[in-house]
Amino acid sequence: MSNKLFVGNLSFETTENDLQDAFAAHGTVTETNIMMDRTTNRPRGFAFVTMSSPEEAQKAIAALNGAQLGGRALTVNVARPREERPGGGGGRGPRREFRGGGRDRY
């Protein structure tokens, strides 16, 4: 089992220090990382917490899954590996040559 945990249903006011304090009661926290929206720079409502061992991670899941933090019931489980996504850059796809047709605009 991994020692990296997914923490969902976070209040937007929750800080990394809040997570550190909540999870430290169940073992040594080596890292906390709240995911932020790139465009608005606001929290996305979930985070990842890394515990020092899989046993401590399991204890934290048992204690904190469903527990209240910031007025919301947390979802805590083992983080899944990141899925490969096709590369891309958004945009509108390949450029197409204008072939005319239809009414003239002028």
Image (cartoon, rainbow, N blue to C red):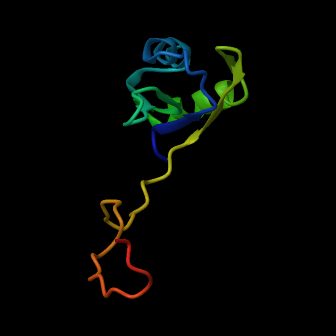
Quarter occupied by residue 4: top left
At 51% from the left edge and 29% from the top edge, which residue is drawn? Answer: 56
At 54% from the left edge and 16% from the top edge, which residue is drawn? Answer: 14
Across and down, in percent, residue 90 comes to: 35, 60
Q: Nearer the viewer, residue 22 or 57?
A: 22
| Image vertical order of residue 74 relative to residue 6, above or below | above
Q: Is residue 63 left or right of residue 106?
A: right
Q: Nearer the viewer, residue 34 or 93?
A: 93
Q: Nearer the viewer, residue 68 or 61?
A: 68
Query: For the image shown, how many numbered marks are present on the structure?
Result: 0
At 61% from the left edge and 21% from the top edge, which residue is drawn? Answer: 11
| Image vertical order of residue 101 relative to residue 57, above or below | below
Q: Is residue 22 left or right of residue 32?
A: right
Considering the image in quadrants, where does the C terminus appear? bottom left
Quarter occupied by residue 85: bottom left
Across and down, in percent, residue 61 comes to: 62, 32
| Image vertical order of residue 88 relative to residue 38, above or below | below
Across and down, in percent, residue 22 comes to: 55, 15
Quarter occupied by residue 62: top right
Across and down, in percent, residue 29 comes to: 42, 22
At 43% from the left edge and 35% from the top edge, which residue is drawn? Answer: 37
| Image vertical order of residue 22 relative to residue 74, above or below | above
